[in-house]
Amino acid sequence: MTSAAARTALDLTSDLPVPDLEDLYRDLHRNPELSLREHRTAGKLAERLERAGFETAQGVGGTGVVGRLANGDGPTVLLRADMDALPVQEATGLAYASQADGVMHACGHDLHVTWLTGAAGALAAGRDTWRGTLLVVGQPAEESGQGAARMVADGLYDRYGRPDVLLGQHAAPGPAGLYPHSPGLIMSAATDVDIVVHGRGGHGSRPEATVDPVVTAAYLVTRLQTVVSREVAAGESAVLTVGRIEAGTRHNIIPSEARVALNLRTQSEEVRQRMLAAIRRIALGECLAAGCPREPGITIGNTFPVTVNDAPTDATVAAVHGEVFGAGTVFDPGPAMGSEDFPMLALDGAIPYSYWFVTTTPAEVWDNAPGDTFPEKFAAVPSNHSPHFAPDLSVIAPGVRTLVSGALALLPAA
């Protein structure tokens, strides 16, 4: 038997302005903005929220948007979408491809804003069906891990009210039409580490008179590959990626320093600390072995927490999604190695939340991907952060319904 929340959600989203939402999505995709520069995107979202009847503010935490709709006694439910794009040169070939050189919505945040806009409009239009308060948040700078914390520090909850529960979702690869939920850990922690190897520069013809930081950095990169394979237990999940290595200016100049940028993914603080200790030890050891004139500089950069769903809250939202979308559409994929700053809105776990995925790969892309099994095809289709990432427009209406049905499952009926 279908719940009242599912029936109401289907009713409120039965006549969504899909062409208008598609136009909004194409516009956002054409005009991506990097972290903390989302001025145009924020303006588009705020304009739509105001039109729907929300009390609206911009500039929260830099470029964040907040919409508040009080609708009688009841809990406060926060719906969140991140807004920033990535420094990626688009290669999709879409008619509405990015017009900003070197910047692309390669992670689906344009889709998130579109979903949030549609859900806010549908819930506002159907406010006679529920009680409580909706807090709609357009968050900047998720990609840099700064946005959620900046909005909280700027008085998000002091100024607009502390929510009782948070809801968030993310576009993901996979055949369009699936809504993966995990009742506990769903995304991993991430930590950026920057290493500076100090050498002694000189002429390329006289390496004996130098200490070459490029060679030392190369040894460092190779040795770092043993951290996960030899220092993390087989039952633990962890990733260490060298995302950038930079050194030198010309062919015949041995530089004075080399820079190596790392990204760690972990699912426990113990493993994170163990990996950081190993990185420090290896960097110090390689520089000592090379005779570097001083110890390497090691700096911890952006850090994302683990994303851990509140099990009862997520069970409630997953159940209504199963009712709305049908059997087999909701499943537990286990925790992903990706990371989010969404949990920072939860104040160190003080506010329960449900966070889930919406698969967005076009059917023809999925069907034509090499492989016979789900994991094989999943590995082959364009993923988030790929220059080829191109969600199917067919997911616009379903992504609105996920937010609408999730909110209605947590708000009392009028």
Image (cartoon, rainbow, N blue to C red):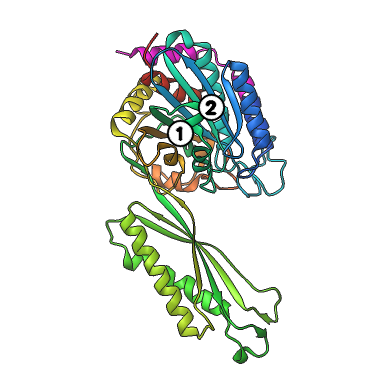
Quadrant for residue 264, please give it. Answer: bottom left
Q: Is residue 186 above or below residue 190?
A: above
42 part of magenta stretch: no
Q: Which residues are magenta?
A: 1-21
Say which amino acid is labelled 1. Answer: Gln
The residue at which mark 2 appears reads as 115
Image position, residue 327 (x, y; %): 34, 24
Q: Give the left or right position of residue 250, taking residue 368 as reference.
A: right
The residue at which mark 1 appears reads as 169
Q: Toward the viewer: 337 or 276?
A: 276
Query: Which residue: 38% across, 69% down?
Result: 278
Whole-angstrom CA distance, mark 2 to mark 1, is 10 Å
Q: Give the left or right position of residue 99, taking residue 173 as reference.
A: right
Quadrant for residue 55, please give it. Answer: top right
Say which amino acid is labelled 2. Answer: Trp
Image position, residue 52 (x, y; %): 59, 16
Quarter of the figure that contains the C terminus? top left
Image position, residue 293 (x, y; %): 54, 84
